[in-house]
Amino acid sequence: MANPTAPAGPRFLVVVPTHRLAVAQATIDELQLSFTYPTEFHILDGSKGKCHAINAALVDRLRLGTHDIYCTVDDDLIMSPNWQHFIACAFDRMPKLGVCGIDYRGSKVGEDLMSAAITAPIRRVADIEFRDCTGVQNVAGGCLAMPAAVAKKVGPFPLANDGRIYHLEEDSWRCHRAITLGYRIGYVSNPNGVVQLLDHANTPQYIEKKAADIAAWQSNPVWS
């Protein structure tokens, strides 16, 4: 599949929350080198939780800027070449697309993350390939892009005063918000390469806290 014709000049806001900058710095540096569109890039302090950092980006950066596409990327992801181009084309070709990820075919971990969300086959949309999320309806896997206007409508994740720093439901909540607003969600294919998900080390304290936070939410899965 040839690279589709690019829409004119979308501006990206890309944010990476991290609580482990020392081990993730090389991955983040590689992400920054992958940008092919005008991009405002921020590494965010995720020590109090990914959601706190993403909410701050929505309030402090997106609402005050002139960006076209808002994208959160995990600190353990190496994106496939020219990934911004395919996300920009997906939003350009599908005006009702609210949340877009990059298809993880070829990555075992990525395909496992996608398997529960995708039951729809690959389909052609003009000059791109796209897969709708029709399963659990969640774009998973560490890269979640939204048109800036949609991100503003979706708004910040509602943080409860429950002491959690790890929110299992964060991506699902944003996707469900987009769906309730009338948008579709899914993955665009990128023939230029495979997204890599790395296994960065976490501290024992973080691993213990993450497990406790997941268990706390699963025992009382409240969707705000």
Image: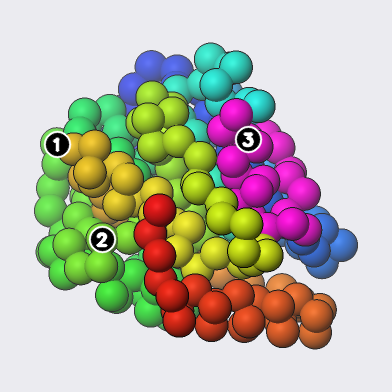
Rounded to the nearest angstrom, the CA distance separating label 3 from label 1 is: 33 Å
Q: From this viewpoint, is residue 158 visible?
A: yes
Residue 137, disc: 2
Highlighted magenta segment, given as a residue range: 41-59
- From the viewer's side, name the closer residue of 203 and 90: 203
N-terminal label among 3 and 1: 3
Q: Which mark is residue 126?
A: 1
- Residue 21 versus residue 182 in the image, above or below: below
Which dot marks residue 57?
Answer: 3
Q: Earlier in the sequence, mark 1 or mark 2?
A: 1
Most extreme residue toward the right, as rendered?
Answer: 22
Q: Are marks 3 and 1 in contact (CB under 8 Å)?
A: no
Q: What is the secondary structure assignment of the residue under circle 1?
A: loop
Kind of residue at badge 1: Ala
Alpha-carbon neighbours of circle 2 within 10 Å: few (<14), some, or many (≥20)? many
Tell me the tag on residue 172: none
Q: Nearer the viewer, residue 159 or 33?
A: 159
- The amino acid type of the residue labelled 2 equals Gln
